[in-house]
Amino acid sequence: MSQTTLTARVCRDCDGFATATITTGFADVDGTRGTVRVNCPTCRGLGHTVPALRTTRAVRGAA
Ligand SMILES: [Zn+2]
């Protein structure tokens, strides 16, 4: 019996909160607060990681 349900693993570094918005302390030209968005470097803003087994299957399937 095969398992068909795939669950995304939560990134262990950011715990699923992959993007942080940081205020710069300065106002933009239109008067709004200036912000900078920073993504988690491990998952690159996805919030989850791809299991190694799925990556291995994809490589075998492509070859
Ligand atoms: Zn992450």
Image (tube, rainbow, N blue to C red):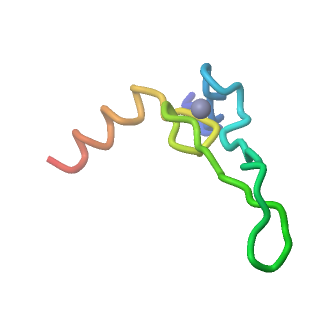
Extreme residue toward the bottom, this view: 30
Q: Is residue 61 above or below residue 3?
A: below
**Residue drawn at (60%, 35%), measured in percent from left and top?**
48
Q: Is residue 18 above or below residue 10?
A: below
Name the residue nearer the viewer: 23 or 14. 23
Q: Position of residue 1 (x, y in %)?
A: 57, 28
- Left or right for 39, reference 24: left
- Left or right for 20, reference 50: right
Q: Position of residue 56 (x, y in %)?
A: 30, 32
**Residue drawn at (73%, 44%), measured in percent from left and top?**
22
Q: Position of residue 53 (x, y in %)?
A: 40, 27
Q: Position of residue 32 (x, y in %)?
A: 85, 69
Q: Is residue 29 above or below residue 41?
A: below
- Left or right for 54, reference 4: left
Total marks drawn? 0
**Residue drawn at (64%, 38%), measured in percent from left and top?**
47
Name the residue nearer the viewer: 22 or 4. 22
Which image quadrant for residue 12? top right
